[in-house]
């Protein structure tokens, strides 16, 4: 495994999980009890809907339009309504006590208290009707209610309200269409996140390490604060600074710190946000972004992951062009070239792949400075740990120097994640402070994954122990190998066990002896399986892959073989414009066979070295395996006590140290 960690996995160690997602969310009863005071047994299905006020208004208008029709359909026949002929017959029989006339409607009240209704012909006089059928009006009490004003109002409502609703409905539709058209025209607007002046509380003090990078950016901050000092000397505005480095090294944090130190507006946008389905949208957004920044000058524009739009144009490296990406890149090039000398607008950009950027983008005059953000060294890691641990409680035994030495190869993001995982672990166990064991467990979880208890047979468990002890013993007894920090047969991720051998200090280059020792350590587990079990497993697949990569690099790139200092890897011919031809220079078949033979030679030497060490230290191997099967995990000092031998030291390092001291004297 990378970062000087070995984790072995068997071919059948991975598991698959699948299943179809359901639109309904299913919550077990025990979880639902915490959500509701009522007792719920079994499983409960919970349904939900998304509230949309615009859709609700549309349905209300449609309902009001069809409301009269719905009333007429669902009202049905009223049993209290009697025909006019029945009313006249009842008047002749003198069973009606009182009649109230409201327009064309007649309300009838009988002597027995019954109340019924009837309707007369529109415009017909009821008294004339009684006279025609020989009914004496004096035999009944008749009251006429004046409905002139209410009738007019009702007529207005009936005639104009539906029309008004239709107008409102169509206005709503037109408004929706206009909004969609506005969104279509708004594609060209920049989607940059805007942070107003004084709202960036990140400073350079909050960024651990990277002294050289902060020094370069400090000059940009000083220019934004005091532009007159530079303009008097004829210095122009730095157009931009390109931050290049691996993921998690703090490039975005550095850009925010520049804005916080300079106390200027900060516009942040990702490179992918320029791209859209429509051609020309990216260029329009680039224009809008730079115009906005110029209006707020002095200001900072930060483009994260600029390689999404700034890749090399043409067919370099076998990658084809993209019209929309190229138009966006051309627009950015024009905007950066079009800055007047007094425009106090700085462009900061970050990328993980600085080698893929177009040369026209990285030349002086556009991105004047190229700042590299590297992985932190031991002092920088200790500084980063103290920054991120300021809001967390720790026990007194926490040694930050030891943790910094333990976390070789960790980025700033990895360190922050490690401290967060440690805090989560302590909270899960209802404790109040974080100790060294929590930090060690969190570091393993970040790099290897959480520990898992797998049910293994005693045979598989013992084979895993011999495999890991083979790695550890070879590393312990080889002078050019890194010391053993921890050895374990507890499964993490897809690995059944692991052996950690981080370097004692940061390394920036490796010698031939160190690479050979590294290959021997990687092959130690496989050789231990062969010696003690006469079997080979698939757990060494990751080790074999790393050994092959190291051997290939030693022959092809480093010139450490008998073939001499020649680069046998693919080489691209570069043109005058910085573009490489698509067909690389390839070596002949005869040379390729010699390269393969040299790789095989390196691997065979490393395998022979590891086999010799394991066979000569058989008793130490068995002692460590016995202790490991009992404890499952051994720390570095426990492992050394079990081996019974001190760590082999490099003679080359000691001779170099003695020569340095003699020169000083």
Image (spheres, rainbow, N blue to C red):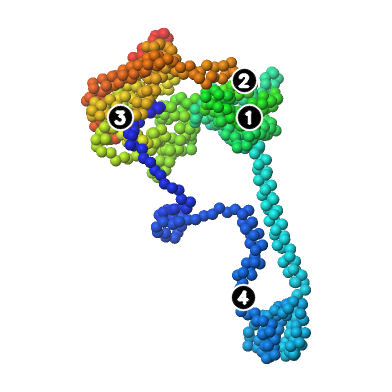
Q: Secondary structure at mark 2?
A: loop
Q: Position of residue 453 (x, y in %)?
A: 32, 40
Q: Residue at x 34, y 33 (%)?
A: 9
- Looking at the rendered image, the quarter that the N terminus falls into is top left
The residue pinned by badge 1 equals 327
Inter-mark Cα distance, 1 to 3: 55 Å
**Circle 4 residues within 10 Å: few <14, some 14–19, many ≥20:** few
Q: Residue at x 63, y 88 (%)?
A: 112
Q: Which mark is residue 77?
A: 4
Q: Position of residue 342 (x, y in %)?
A: 70, 25
Mark earlier in primary sequence (3, 4): 4
Residue 333 vs residue 490, the one in the foreground:
333
Picture layout, residue 291 above or below residue 29: above
Q: Which mark is residue 468?
A: 3
Query: Could one spot residue 185 in this view of the protein?
Result: yes
- Looking at the rendered image, the quarter that the C terminus falls into is top left
Residue 224 vs residue 89, the one in the foreground:
89
Q: Which mark is residue 364?
A: 2
Closest to the camera, between mark 1 and mark 3, is 1
Picture layout, residue 437 above or below residue 613: below
Inter-mark Cα distance, 2 to 1: 21 Å
Closest to the camera, between mark 1 and mark 4, is 4
Q: Secondary structure at mark 4?
A: loop
């Amino acid at each position: 495994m990378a970062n000087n960690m070995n984790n072995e996995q068997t071919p059948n160690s991975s598991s698959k999980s699948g299943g179809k997602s359901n639109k309904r969310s299913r919550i077990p009863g025990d979880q639902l009890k915490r959500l509701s005071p009522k007792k719920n047994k079994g499983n409960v299905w919970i349904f939900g809907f998304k509230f949309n006020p615009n859709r609700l208004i549309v349905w209300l208008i449609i309902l009001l339009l069809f409301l009269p029709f719905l009333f007429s359909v669902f009202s049905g026949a009223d049993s209290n309504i009697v025909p006019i002929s029945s009313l006249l017959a009842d008047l002749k029989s003198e069973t009606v006590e009182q009649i109230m006339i409201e327009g064309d409607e007649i309300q009838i009240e009988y002597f027995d208290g019954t109340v019924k209704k009837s309707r007369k012909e529109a415009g017909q006089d009821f008294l004339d009707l009684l006279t025609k059928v020989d009914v004496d009006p004096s035999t009944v009490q008749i009251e006429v209610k004046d409905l002139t004003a209410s009738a007019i109002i009702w007529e207005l409502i009936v005639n104009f309200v539906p029309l008004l609703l239709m107008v409102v409905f169509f206005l709503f539709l037109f408004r929706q269409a206009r909004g969609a058209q506005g969104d279509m025209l708004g594609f060209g607007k920049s989607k940059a996140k805007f942070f107003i002046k004084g709202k960036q509380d990140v400073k350079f003090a909050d960024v651990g390490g990277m002294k050289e990078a902060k020094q370069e950016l400090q000059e940009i901050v000083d220019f934004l604060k005091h532009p007159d000092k530079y303009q008097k000397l004829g210095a122009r505005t730095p157009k931009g600074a390109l931050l290049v480095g691996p993921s998690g090294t703090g490039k975005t944090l550095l850009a925010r710190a520049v804005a916080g130190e300079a106390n200027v507006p900060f516009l942040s946008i990702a490179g992918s946000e320029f791209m859209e389905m429509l051609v020309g949208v990216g260029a329009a957004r680039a224009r809008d972004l730079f115009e906005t920044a110029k209006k707020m000058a002095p200001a900072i524009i930060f483009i994260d992951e600029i390689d999404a739009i700034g890749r090399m144009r043409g067919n370099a490296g076998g990658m084809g062009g993209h019209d929309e990406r190229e138009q966006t890149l051309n627009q950015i090039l024009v905007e950066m070239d079009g800055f007047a000398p007094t425009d106090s607008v700085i462009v900061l950009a970050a990328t993980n792949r600085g080698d893929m950027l177009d040369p026209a983008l990285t030349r002086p005059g556009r991105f004047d400075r190229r700042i590299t953000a590297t992985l932190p060294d031991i002092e920088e890691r200790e500084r980063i740990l103290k920054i991120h641990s300021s809001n967390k409680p720790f026990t007194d035994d926490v040694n930050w120097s030891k943790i910094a030495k333990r976390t070789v190869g960790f980025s700033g993001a990895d360190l922050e994640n490690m401290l967060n995982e440690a805090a989560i672990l302590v909270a899960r166990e209802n404790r109040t402070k974080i100790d060294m064991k929590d930090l060690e467990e969190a570091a393993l979880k970040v790099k290897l994954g959480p520990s898992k208890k797998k049910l293994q047979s005693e045979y598989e468990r013992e084979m895993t122990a011999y495999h890991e002890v083979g790695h550890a013993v070879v590393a312990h007894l080889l002078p050019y190998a890194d010391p053993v920090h921890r050895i374990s047969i507890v499964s993490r991720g897809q690995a059944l066990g692991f052996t950690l051998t981080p370097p004692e200090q940061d390394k920036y280059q490796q010698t031939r002896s160190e690479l050979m020792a590294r290959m021997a350590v990687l092959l130690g587990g496989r050789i231990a399986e062969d010696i003690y079990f006469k079997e080979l497993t698939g757990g060494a697949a990751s080790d074999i892959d790393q050994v092959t990569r190291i051997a290939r690099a030693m022959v092809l790139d480093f010139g450490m073989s008998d073939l001499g200092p020649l680069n046998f890897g693919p080489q691209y011919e570069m043109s005058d414009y910085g573009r490489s031809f698509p067909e690389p220079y390839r070596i002949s078949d005869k040379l390729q066979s010699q390269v393969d033979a040299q790789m095989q030679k390196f691997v065979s030497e490393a395998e022979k070295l590891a086999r010799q060490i394991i066979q000569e230290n058989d008793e130490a191997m068995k002692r460590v395996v016995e202790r490991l099967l009992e404890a499952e995990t051994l720390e570095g000092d426990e492992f050394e006590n079990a081996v019974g031998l001190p760590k082999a030291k490099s003679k080359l390092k000691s001779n170099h140290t003695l020569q340095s001291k003699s020169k000083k004297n």
